[in-house]
Amino acid sequence: DSGVTQTPKHLITATGQRVTLRCSPRSGDLSVYWYQQSLDQGLQFLIHYYNGEERAKGNILERFSAQQFPDLHSELNLSSLELGDSALYFCASSVSSGRRNEQFFGPGTRLTVL
Amino acid sequence: AQSVTQLGSHVSVSEGALVLLRCNYSSSVPPYLFWYVQYPNQGLQLLLKYTSAATLVKGINGFEAEFKKSETSFHLTKPSAHMSDAAEYFCAVTAGGSQGNLIFGKGTKLSVKP
């Protein structure tokens, strides 16, 4: 158990819908990273928040957004869903925002768009 | 730009045999490198990390990796494979600049035959 929690574990929805994925970092960690894992693209970085502020963006679509709240939990919002958004979404937390800090991954949310 | 190449999408070994999973990196700055393992339907678990200290890094479950700057490699090894080592293994490098997000290789699926 990494100490990072993600809800829900599974999510099945239809095209055009909007969903929210939730992540609670390990106690004491200030950074939250979101990654998408799909068969064709592999593991890709989406976005990074540190202590409530956006720090970096990766291959995140404009239909996707995220935020980190004062209690440090984070939410990833996916809207106007398409079939291609079906994937495993991971969040990871780290004690700070530096390059040498290891990241601890949650169990993921499997999103299926029908 | 930073990148990681994992040679061999699938490696099969016999129980008790040497495990060697290959990872080559490209980095414009001194790299920080990580190996993660993913068991079916689970999140990623950190095996070991290289953060510019000792070039031979020991991790969990008997795995180790050697950082070779001249070869831009960070191969993962284990002297004797166990059935429980069957999983997918990902090599990752942190992004450049001050960014801490990870750039992953495409992964190597390890099968262990009895």
Image (spheres, rainbow, N blue to C red):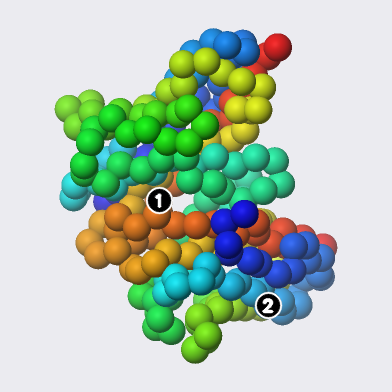
Quadrant for residue B26, please give it: top left
Amino acid type assigned to the residue bearing label 2 in the image: Thr
| Mark 1 lies on residue | B103
Instruction: Indicate which disc residue A110 carries.
Output: none
Q: What's the chain of the residue with tag 1?
A: B
**Secondary structure beneath disc 2?**
strand
Identity of the residue drawn at 49% across and 89% down: A70
How far across and down, in percent of the image, does residue A81 sit? 70, 71
Give amino acid for label 1.
Ile
Q: Is residue A19 left or right of residue B34?
A: right
**Residue B34 visible within the image:** yes
* Residue shown at 68% from the left, 77% from the top: A20
Q: Could you say where residue B64 lies in the image, as x and y percent from the top left? A: 39, 29
Graded by Cα atoms within 10 Å as few (under 14), some (14 to 19) or many (20 or more), the crowding at tag 2 reads some
The picture places residue A74, in percent across and down from the top left corner, at: 55, 77
The numbered disc on residue A20 is: 2
Instruction: Give the residue drawn at x 57%, y 11%.
Output: B16
Query: Quarter of the image holding residue B48?
Result: top left
